[in-house]
């Protein structure tokens, strides 16, 4: 059902009420005093002598009054600023008129910008906040240059520039300074024309095509200066390095995970010469230790859970006979079945030069490859892509060095070699990886305890999602403890591990055979020569929106670049890295507006766009529409009633801001909403599409139907009711 957002319930801020009152009062005063009749060319010419006489009699009050009127007119975006500028020249002459007009126009423009910011920016941000973020980032970076260009070209109405700049984050002081500087050339032209007021027949004749062209060229000056400064910075950046005259490759890709593989694939497809370097195993973490093995494990675990709860399907429940080693053997088989897709042989056949070894940057164009036997090869390329991936984080806990700590990378071999058929585990971390593995291992019959530092599981999702996931994990036998602070870890008295935690002021100790850390991942930054070139890094390699690092010909993609850590976003970024690297200076900024994510618990959690909590945090106005899986025919017959579809939309409109789905196959159900958001299709289009019956995908249609029902035109329906009553003869 639909409900108003928290933002809609909030009252209008007092400053907006005062600003609106000021605006209305100024407009009323302007027209009540009849100034609109005085601010045209003929009226100015008729009163020129009288105005000059007033100026001679009282120069200071006349100058102050002129500036005040100018500020009022421009600050309220009223018509007449052009005539006032001419009046400045006619009354005060070229020098003094220019000073007064420049002062009045700057103060008025700043006032107009402040009014627009007070009245319009907050509502605009609430409605379009997530879309404005990249625009605001651009204005923080290049706002002065944009504003100066607009001011220097008088073809763009100044009042419109004032209003638009009020929607940006540009501070008022730089706005005022740049505005005064940018408006000065046109001010001089108009004030000078005002000194010849008697000969003027039309305002339109002041700016000749030649003069307009000159001012337009002047408007390009900031960008020419910026271009020259950029070239100078690049020259200084690359000066310490010797640029090769010829390159061995068009592109070198370091890392053969999802980002590296897709980058190399695209480069080979467009017939460039590309080398792909991998120091470990082709396919990276996703194939070998992440997505593929974990989903193979989860599929076995879900079947075991279905057997354990077979009474939900009218069958006799039974405890499954789980042989963990056979399950892990199946996992290895599935990895081996997928491996040819990412193999050296396949990519060599595609035209990629694949090298196995450690890659290290020697210069912005040169890479050293050290093979397993110690031999070193040097290659050069016009562009380089760093797709070095990420590794699990092991927290710096007291006693952690005394234990063998498992991660999502080492779990598989450790469990396969474990002497116990059902080793117990303590899992640190209640994010997606921790929840997925904890539930799957518990469904396979392993004793699992999950410890989460946050007060809820999946803290990036809405609270109701975390609560539901906790319920299903506990249903499958996982002992869940949230709000835990790990004090120390160490070996157990009889082997295994001990984890000492503090929960709500109470000290607890958990013992298990193994400790599994799933507290996050960090980019692999060491050993690739980043420090040699001084490439900035933090949690990830620092890049711009085009994925360029400090050196514009060196790019980063995937987990190494962030901000997402998904295989599909790594592949998404790979397209930009490949195209930008191969076809520079043509560049494309990464489109990160519609990013889906799925947590493969049972049921799954899938989301795209904003969650409800994120919308509140970002002050984006929204409505919520829900549909419970318990109402869906296919979910009922499948005994899969747990879950819901929740859609956030713009208030009063069907435009989708975000979707959260908790359901079996939620990741599959989400795809329809991902496409709808990507193509700007609203819930009306989703509801209008025919969905096969009975399918889980109908949940999307019914969620859209709930939105439509909540926004039904009640007056029209009342009229229709009366019409049908009349048709019945009533």
Image (spheres, helix red, strand yellow):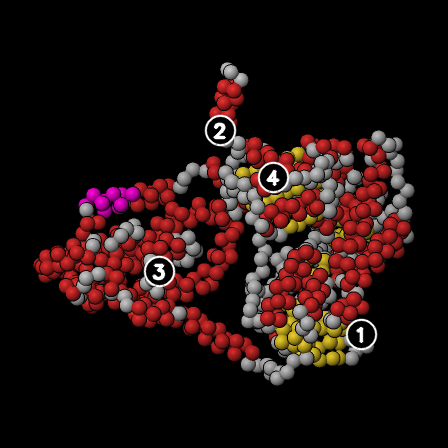
Q: Dot 2, crowdedness within 10 Å: few (<14), some or many (≥20)?
A: few
Q: Nearer the viewer, mark 2 or mark 1?
A: 2
x 62%, y 76%: residue: 382
Q: Are marks 2 and 3 in contact (CB under 8 Å)?
A: no
Q: Earlier in the sequence, mark 3 or mark 4?
A: 3
Majority secondary structure of the magenta segment? helix
Residue 29 in magenta stretch: yes
Q: Is residue 631 in view?
A: yes
Q: Earlier in the sequence, mark 3 or mark 1?
A: 3
x 59%, y 65%: residue: 547
Q: Nearer the viewer, mark 3 or mark 1?
A: 3
x 19%, y 57%: residue: 41
Q: Point out which mark residue 688 bears.
A: 4
SS for callout 3: loop
Give the residue at mark 1.
Answer: 372
Q: Position of residue 487 (x, y in %)?
A: 70, 50
Quadrant containing the N terminus is: top right
The boundaries of the magenta stretch are 24-33
Q: Point out which mark residue 215 bears.
A: none
x 53%, y 17%: residue: 728
SS for callout 2: helix
Q: How many marks?
A: 4
C-alpha gap between disc 3 and disc 4 = 43 Å
Residue nearest the viewer, comparing 645 with 476: 645
Give the residue at mark 3.
Answer: 156
Q: Earlier in the sequence, mark 1 or mark 4?
A: 1
Q: Earlier in the sequence, mark 2 or mark 1?
A: 1
Give the residue at mark 2.
Answer: 716
């Amino acid at each position: 059902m639909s409900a108003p957002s928290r933002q809609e319930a909030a009252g209008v801020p007092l400053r907006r009420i005062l600003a609106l009152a000021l605006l209305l009062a100024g407009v009323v005063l302007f027209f009540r005093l009849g100034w609109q009749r005085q601010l045209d060319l003929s009226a100015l010419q008729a009163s020129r002598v009288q105005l000059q006489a007033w100026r001679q009699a009282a120069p200071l009050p006349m100058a102050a009054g002129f500036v005040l009127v100018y500020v009022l007119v421009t600050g309220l975006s009223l018509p007449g600023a052009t005539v006032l500028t001419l009046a400045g020249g006619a009354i005060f002459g070229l020098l003094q008129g220019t000073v007064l007009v420049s002062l009045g126009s700057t103060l008025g423009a700043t006032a107009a910008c402040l009014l627009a910011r007070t009245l319009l920016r907050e509502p605009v941000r609430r409605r379009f906040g997530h879309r404005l973020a990249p625009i605001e980032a651009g204005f923080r970076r290049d706002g002065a240059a944009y504003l100066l260009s607009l001011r220097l070209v008088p073809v763009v109405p100044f009042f419109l520039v004032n209003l638009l700049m009020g929607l940006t984050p540009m501070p008022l002081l730089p706005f005022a300074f740049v505005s005064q500087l940018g408006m000065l050339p046109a001010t001089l032209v108009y004030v000078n024309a005002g000194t010849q007021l008697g000969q003027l027949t039309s305002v339109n004749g002041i700016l000749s095509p030649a003069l307009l062209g000159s001012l337009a060229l002047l408007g390009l000056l900031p960008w020419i200066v910026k271009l020259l400064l950029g070239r100078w910075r690049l020259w200084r950046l690359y000066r310490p390095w010797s640029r090769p005259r010829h390159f061995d490759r068009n592109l070198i890709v370091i890392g053969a995970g999802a980002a590296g593989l897709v980058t190399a694939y695209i480069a080979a497809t467009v017939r460039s010469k590309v080398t792909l370097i991998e120091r470990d195993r082709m396919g990276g973490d996703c194939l070998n230790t992440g997505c593929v093995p974990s989903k193979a494990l989860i599929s076995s675990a879900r079947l075991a859970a279905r057997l354990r709860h077979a009474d939900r399907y009218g069958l006799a429940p039974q405890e499954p006979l789980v042989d963990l080693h056979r399950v892990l053997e199946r996992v290895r088989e599935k990895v081996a079945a997928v491996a040819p897709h990412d193999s050296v042989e396949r990519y060599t056949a595609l035209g990629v030069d694949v090298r196995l070894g450690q890659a290290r940057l020697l210069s912005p164009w040169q890479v050293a490859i050290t093979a397993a036997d110690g031999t070193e090869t040097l290659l050069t390329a016009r562009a380089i892509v760093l797709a070095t991936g990420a590794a699990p984080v092991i927290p710096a806990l007291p006693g952690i060095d005394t234990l063998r700590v498992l991660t999502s990378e080492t779990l598989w071999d450790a469990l396969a070699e474990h002497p116990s058929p059902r080793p117990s585990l303590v899992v640190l971390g209640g994010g997606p990886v921790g929840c997925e593995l904890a539930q799957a291992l518990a469904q396979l019959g392993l004793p699992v305890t999950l410890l989460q530092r946050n007060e809820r599981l999946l803290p990036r999702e809405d609270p109701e999602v975390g609560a539901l996931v906790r319920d299903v994990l506990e249903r499958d036998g996982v002992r869940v403890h949230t709000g835990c602070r790990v004090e120390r870890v160490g070996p157990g008295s009889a082997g295994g591990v001990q984890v000492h935690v503090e929960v709500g002021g109470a000290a607890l100790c958990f013992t298990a055979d193994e400790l599994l850390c799933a507290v996050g991942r960090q980019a692999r930054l060491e050993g690739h020569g980043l420090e040699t070139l001084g490439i900035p890094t933090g949690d990830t390699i620092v890049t711009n929106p085009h994925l360029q690092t400090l050196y514009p010909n060196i790019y980063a993609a995937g987990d190494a670049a962030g901000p997402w850590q998904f295989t599909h976003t790594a592949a998404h970024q790979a397209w930009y890295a490949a195209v930008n690297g191969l076809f520079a200076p043509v560049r494309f900024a990464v489109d990160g507006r519609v990013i889906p994510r799925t947590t493969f618990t049972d049921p799954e959690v899938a989301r795209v766009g904003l969650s409800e909590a994120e919308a509140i945090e970002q002050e984006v106005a929204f409505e919520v529409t829900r549909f419970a899986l318990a109402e869906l025919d296919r979910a009922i017959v499948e005994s899969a009633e747990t879950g819901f579809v929740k859609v956030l939309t713009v208030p009063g409109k069907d435009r989708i801001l975000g979707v959260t789905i908790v359901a079996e196959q939620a990741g599959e159900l989400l795809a329809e909403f991902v496409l709808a958001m990507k193509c700007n299709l609203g819930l009306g289009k989703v509801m209008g599409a025919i969905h096969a019956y009975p399918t889980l995908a109908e949940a999307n249609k019914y969620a859209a139907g709930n939105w439509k029902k909540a926004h039904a035109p009640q007056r029209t329906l009342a009229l229709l009711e009366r019409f049908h009553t009349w048709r019945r003869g009533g």
